[in-house]
Image (cartoon, rainbow, N blue to C red):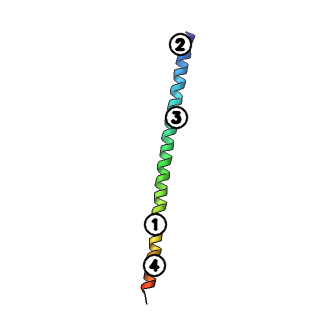
Amino acid sequence: MADALAVIHTYTTVLTWAERSWYVALGLSALVGLGYLACNRIGASFTRAHQTITDIQTRQEEQP
């Protein structure tokens, strides 16, 4: 009986750690996804700002 309980305990412990690992993996995946979106947003803002500055400089050079 004790051996059966030890096997059940080991099995449930392994399942618990597997479940926790799954949640950690999901959390990290979400964190990486949000970081990716944030970096894309920052990059797009930088590109847009750089283009605006270039447009202003071009217009100033074209004016007599």
Percent position of residue 15, x then y: 50, 26
Q: Which residue is mark 4?
A: 56
Q: Which residue is mark 2?
A: 4
Q: Secondary structure at mark 2?
A: helix
C-alpha gap between disc 4 and disc 3: 52 Å
Closer-to-camera residue (24/57): 57
Q: Amino acid at mark 3?
A: Ser
Q: Are marks 3 and 2 in contact (CB under 8 Å)?
A: no
Which residue: 49% across, 48% down?
32
Percent position of residue 8, x then y: 52, 18
Which of pointers 1 and 3 lies earlier in the amino acid sequence? 3
Q: Is residue 59 above or below residue 52?
A: below
Percent position of residue 3, x then y: 56, 12
Split into 4 quadrants, where in the image is the C terminus? Answer: bottom left
| Callout 4 crowding tier (Cα within 10 Å): few <14, some 14–19, many ≥20 | few
Check residue 21 in the rendering and tell me which mark sits there, or answer none.
3
Check residue 12 in the rendering and tell me which mark sits there, or answer none.
none
Q: Are marks 1 and 3 in contact (CB under 8 Å)?
A: no
Which of pointers 2 and 1 lies earlier in the amino acid sequence? 2
| Callout 2 crowding tier (Cα within 10 Å): few <14, some 14–19, many ≥20 | few
Q: Which residue is mark 1?
A: 47
C-alpha gap between disc 2 and disc 4: 78 Å
C-alpha gap between disc 2 and disc 1: 64 Å
Q: Is residue 39 above or below residue 32?
A: below
Which of pointers 4 and 3 lies earlier in the amino acid sequence? 3
Q: Secondary structure at mark 4?
A: helix
